[in-house]
Image (cartoon, rainbow, N blue to C red):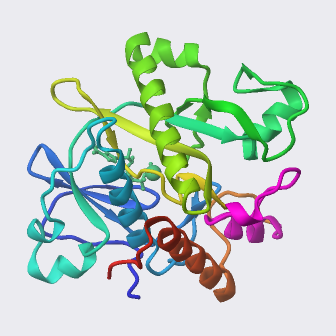
Amino acid sequence: MNSLYQSSIKSLPLLGHGKVRDNYAVGDDKILIVTSDRLSAFDVVMNEPIPGKGKVLNQMTDFWFSKLGHIVPNHLTGVAPESVVAADEVEQVQGRAVVAKRLKPIMVEAVVRGYIIGSGWKDYQDTGSICGIKLPEGLKQAEKLPQPIFTPAAKADLGEHDENISFAEMESRIGAELAAKMRDVAIQLYTEASEFAATKGIIIADTKFEFGLDENGVMHLMDEVLTADSSRFWPADSYATGISPPSFDKQFVRDYLETLDWGKTAPAPALPADVINKTQAKYFEAIERLTGEKLKA
Ligand SMILES: Nc1ncnc2c1ncn2[C@@H]1O[C@H](COP(=O)(O)OP(=O)(O)O)[C@@H](O)[C@H]1O
Ligand SMILES: [Mg+2]
């Protein structure tokens, strides 16, 4: 598997490097989004690529876009990434890029939680609520919630952590109508996706969606969708409450990083080969289980 840590497409204007994606302008209404093999943990980008990870994320997102397209429009244009770059740049985009509608990002991330874990579990232990949403007493770590909950987060500037906000705060930032629409669509996307994943032996514990508006103000699903980076995927056969269940995502890296004396700010510590290899295997296993197909080269 060839690896791409950072793309360098010279034939298009660079819009910017995110933690994982590199964005380029295609005309003034489209963008080329190249998903690199970078891995970020605790919002810090690691120095080593996870070979093929970007392809996994891109192909998972494509899979969900086609499965969930009836719920909400998405940013795909259908334009082939290979057709918008120079011949000697084709290899950089193959299997890991999309040409998307250039949308105006809504600066609130749509987080949906079906299980109580991570920061939600911490919050619940302290307050009996997650992001101000009161929950029943006596829930155990990793327990399924009575129904999925919507816990928005304000999109942070580069290098900052996203910040949980209340639904009322979301309404005041983007308007009540758009906030309600985002919440309802996000819950529906999560519900359908988690029902499908369950048939493949995967629990989607939680996930994050991003939306943007087109030139007519129509809300579109954008960015990455239900990937192992934006979600917690648990193999159903090793799921249990009272623990943090093993997952198909970068939990493996996070667990390793927790063993170090590292302040979770850049620069990142070096990842051992064994951590890189195991993490790569998790991403590949996730896409094969979910789609029933091997990664396309
Ligand atoms: N269709 C789109 N139009 C405009 N911006 C988009 C679109 N799809 C994704 N983005 C933005 O592109 C960036 C993707 O890069 P990524 O590495 O995921 O960034 P981040 O570090 O912010 O997570 C994100 O800021 C995302 O909001
Ligand atoms: Mg992102």
Q: In this view, does 248 lie to the left or right of 190?
A: right
Q: Is residue 202 left or right of residue 219?
A: right
Q: Which residue lies furthest to the front in this view?
A: 199
Against 148, residue 69 (above or below) is below
**Residue at 76% from the left image edge and 65% from the top image edge:** 238
In the image, the segment drawn in magenta is 236-261
Against 56, residue 33 (above or below) is above
Whether residue 52 is visible here, answered yes or no, is yes
Return the residue nearer the eye: 129 or 173.
129
Measured as percent of width and height from the top left, residue 292 is found at 44, 72
**Residue at 17% from the left image edge and 66% from the top image edge:** 81
Total labels: the figure holds 0
Is the N terminus in the top left, top right, bottom left or bottom right quadrant?
Answer: bottom left
**Residue at 23% from the left image edge and 81% from the top image edge:** 91
Is the C terminus in the top left, top right, bottom left or bottom right quadrant?
Answer: bottom left
Q: Is residue 264 left or right of residue 80?
A: right
Q: In this view, does 133 lie to the left or right of 220?
A: right
Whether residue 157 is visible here, answered yes or no, is no
Measured as percent of width and height from the top left, residue 243 is found at 86, 55
Measured as percent of width and height from the top left, residue 127 is found at 85, 25
Return the residue nearer the eye: 159 or 36.
36
Return the residue nearer the eye: 81 or 149.
149
